[in-house]
Image (cartoon, grey):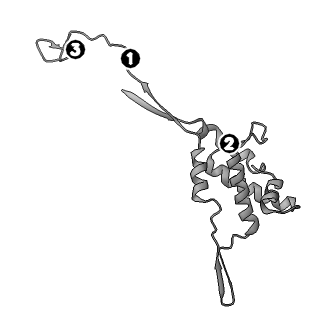
């Protein structure tokens, strides 16, 4: 008999770290956001709030925190930082998540999707992978008798490999 085991260290350790640390450590800086928005000065509190929210969204999609054990940022890929800044910029420009606006006879619709399909595809490619292997559950050859006594039969029956 063979037992197939599927295991992932992410399943056992990463969610705990995610819950503990990701709420407060953004993946990008407020200066990154200011540069993207083309602003010299930016409201630091609001920038931090949208960066934390954008970072949580990115981390959730990627399944990684990019934090060390102390909760400090640990070298996220540049593309992850860029995606975080772009998501934060969308949140900055549309803080209430309005998807449609009407003024008099004029109506405008906005895309509310913060992560693009391309962003999702890239972030999903960063998900930690699980390992799959087999574990044999058979023992060494068993010693089997040449014959087996059967109750109610006069002669024992042969045992062993019939082929």
Residue 160 - label = 3
Q: Nearer the viewer, residue 109 or 40?
A: 40
Mark 2, residue position: 16
Give the farthest residue toward the bottom: 105
Could you tell me which quadrant the C terminus lies in? top left
Mark 3 neighbour density, 10 Å: few (under 14) some (14–19) many (20 or more): few
Residue 139 - label = 1
Residue at x 79% of width, y 37% of height: 70
**N-terminal label among 2 and 3:** 2
Mark 1 neighbour density, 10 Å: few (under 14) some (14–19) many (20 or more): few
**N-terminal label among 1 and 3:** 1
**N-terminal label among 2 and 1:** 2
Q: Nearer the viewer, residue 85 or 162?
A: 85
The reply to whether the C-beta atoms of the residues labelled 2 and 1 are less than 8 Å apart is no
Q: What percent of the width, then of the height, locates residue 96?
A: 72, 70
Q: What percent of the width, then of the height, locates residue 74?
A: 75, 39
Residue 86 - label = none
Residue at x 53% of width, y 37% of height: 130
Give the farthest residue toward the right: 41
Residue at x 68% of width, y 42% of height: 16
Residue at x 12% of width, y 11% of height: 155
Could you tell me which quadrant the N terminus lies in? top left
């Amino acid at each position: 008999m063979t037992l197939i085991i599927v295991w992932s260290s992410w399943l056992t350790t990463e969610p705990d770290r995610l819950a503990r640390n990701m709420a407060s450590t953004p993946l990008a800086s407020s200066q990154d956001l200011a540069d993207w928005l083309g602003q010299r000065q930016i409201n630091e509190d609001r920038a931090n709030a949208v960066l934390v929210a954008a970072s949580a969204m990115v981390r959730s999609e990627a399944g990684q925190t990019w934090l060390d054990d102390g909760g400090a940022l640990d070298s996220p890929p540049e593309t992850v930082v860029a995606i975080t800044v772009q998501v934060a910029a969308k949140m900055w420009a549309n803080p209430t998540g309005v998807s449609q606006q009407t003024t008099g006879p004029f109506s405008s619709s906005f895309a509310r999707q913060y992560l693009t399909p391309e962003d999702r595809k890239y972030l999903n490619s960063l998900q930690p992978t699980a390992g799959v292997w087999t574990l044999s559950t058979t023992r060494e050859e068993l010693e089997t008798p040449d014959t087996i006594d059967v109750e109610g039969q006069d002669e024992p029956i042969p045992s062993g490999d019939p082929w």
